[in-house]
Image (tube, rainbow, N blue to C red):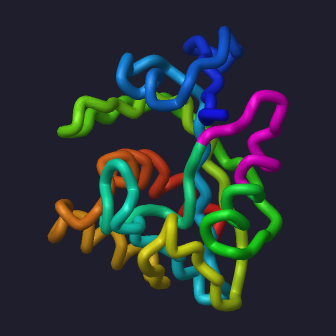
Amino acid sequence: MKEQVILVDQQDNPIGLMEKIEAHEKALLHRAFSVFVFNDKNELMLQQRAVEKYHSPLLWTNTCCSHQRDGESNIEAGKRRLQEEMGFSCELEEVFSFIYKAPFDNGLTEHEYDHVMIGRFNDEPIVNPEEVASYKWMPLEEVKNDIENHPEEYTAWFKIIFKESYDKISKYI
């Protein structure tokens, strides 16, 4: 079965389900989440998307992000996807949410009601090579500087989410 996303209104109320690619082709607002995992040094774990990804291959992004399934809480979705992509799970806390829109060169558009969560983890992940090419830990300030100096190395949505969340996430680490 093809993956579906939860279509939502501007207040995050569910209004239907749609196949993921179709929602991205039509740029329809749908529920999503972004997970930022930090270690005890307050470094952020970034992932480099696998070369096989249908958009933004080999670009760097936050620890993981995806879409909630119908009936799944934000936290449950974040933990599921962390396990699927990065090979670990940790406690997550939702810190804020916001709406963003990011078009891609391939005709798809991310138009998401994004729930941003943070977690803590200090071990090495066991990455899923179908999802993740590599990972690294970086202090937030270094991430900010690297995005400014090398924006082409980061996913479109991560640049938006990072800018929106920098001050909010900084308070939690």
Residue 119 percent coordinates (x, y):
71, 67
- Between 114 and 165, the one lying in front of the other is 114
Count of labels in the image: 0
In this rendering, the answer to whether 167 lies above or below 85 is above
Q: Is residue 166 magenta?
A: no
What residue sits 69% from the left and 75% below the top? Answer: 87
Percent across and percent down for residue 121 are 71, 80
Whether 4 is drawn above or below 52: the answer is: above
Image quarter hosting the C terminus: bottom right
Residue 3, percent across and down?
Answer: 61, 35
Instruction: Give the extent of the magenta segment.
Output: 67-78
Q: Nearer the viewer, residue 13 or 109?
A: 109
Query: In the image, is 43 to the left or to the right of 102?
Result: right
Quarter occupied by residue 134: bottom left
Residue found 61% across the figure and 28% down from its top = 5
Quadrant of the rendered image containing residue 21? top left
Quadrant location of the N terminus in the rendered image: top right
* 101 and 39: which is toward the camera: 101
Taking the image as shown, residue 3 lies to the left or right of residue 94, namely left
Does the stretch in magenta take in 71?
yes
Q: Nearer the viewer, residue 117 or 132?
A: 132
